[in-house]
Image (cartoon, helix red, strand yellow):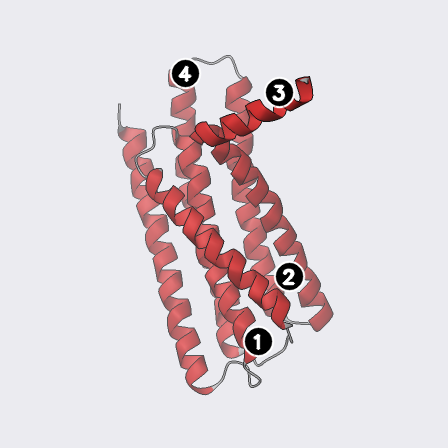
Amino acid sequence: MKKKRGESTFFKRLKTDFEFRTYITSTVSFFVTFLFAVYNVFLGIAYKTVWNIGIAVYYLLLVGVRAFVGYKEIKLKKSQLEEIVKDERRKNVYIAQSVMFFIIDLALIGPITLMVLQRKSVDYSKIPAIAIAAYTVFKIATSSVSYAKTRNAEHLSVKMLKNVNFIDALVSVLTLQYTLIMTFDSKGITGSMLTLCAITSFVIWVFLIAVSVTNLIRAVKTKRAL
């Protein structure tokens, strides 16, 4: 009875408490992203493709940002500091996260360049390609809605975790693009496909830069606000 009651309380809180739900979903995303990074390391070693290693490094950086924000929030919750002091420290974490976004944006230049220029090197089967496509669509939809909801959120840790989820979703579009080309185009990235891939990759990267700039501006404004 106690176990069932505990499960009922957990799911009820998961449904009604947005902050709690954010922590749970971010924890799940942390492990999923880590596994996806490991999977790409495996592909990079097995097929000797630098692109998979490069994108794995990028995802590991995202894992690092999530771990940084999560660790800081856990540490603050356990501390005996006053709430006003905790809020000030969260503002510092918010600025640090925004700077980290620029670093990982620069780290993405390598994988994008390799994706556009390299020849076909990995033969993905259709099932993993379709699975990645479905997961990407789900991630884009859920993270976009959450990102919009938390634009004016007062709890900075929730906002920061949702920011990471949104950027993670945007980068997954690049991964999906590469996977679909490697799966369904026997020639790989050549000709008109090369042009299309270059344009879409550049647009997504510029959008990521714009998101990073927006986050940094908001972080600075938040830090200066009383």
Residue highlighted by disc 3: 5
Q: Which residue is mark 2?
A: 40
Location of residue 51 with respect to 151 vertically, above or below: below
Category of crowding for the residue at label 3, using alpha-carbon neighbours closer than 10 angstroms: few (below 14), some (14–19), many (at least 20)? few
Is label 1 or label 3 in front?
3
Residue 88 appears in view: yes
Is tag 3's residue or tag 2's residue first in the polypeptide sequence? 3
Q: Closer to the camera: disc 1 or disc 2?
A: 1
Location of residue 54 in the rendering, given as x and y in whole percent from the top left corner: 58, 62
Separation of residues labelled 4 and 3 (CA atoms): 32 Å
Q: Earlier in the sequence, mark 1 or mark 2?
A: 2
**Of callouts 4 and 3, the N-terminal one:** 3
Q: How much space separates mark 1 and mark 4, taking CA atoms?
A: 51 Å
Q: Indicate the amino acid at tag 1.
A: Met
Asked if the residues shown at circle 1 and circle 3 are in contact, with their CB atoms under 8 angstroms apart, the answer is no
> In this rendering, does residue 92 appear at all?
no
Q: Secondary structure at mark 1?
A: helix
Q: Quadrant of residue 157?
A: top left
- Please, what secondary structure does the residue beneath circle 2 have? helix
Lower position in the chain sequence, tag 1 or tag 3: 3
- Please tell me in which quadrant of the rendered image residue 17 appears: top left
Disc 1 crowd rating (10 Å Cα; few below 14, some 14-19, many 20+) is many
Q: Circle 1 sits on which residue?
A: 182
- Residues under labels 1 and 3: Cα distance? 49 Å
Residue, x 35% and y 51% (percent of image)?
Answer: 211
> Residue 176's spot in the image, x, y percent?
51, 65
Which mark, by number, is residue 83? 4
* Left or right of 24, for residue 219: left
Mark-to-mark CA distance, 3 and 2: 40 Å
- For mark 4, give the secondary structure: helix
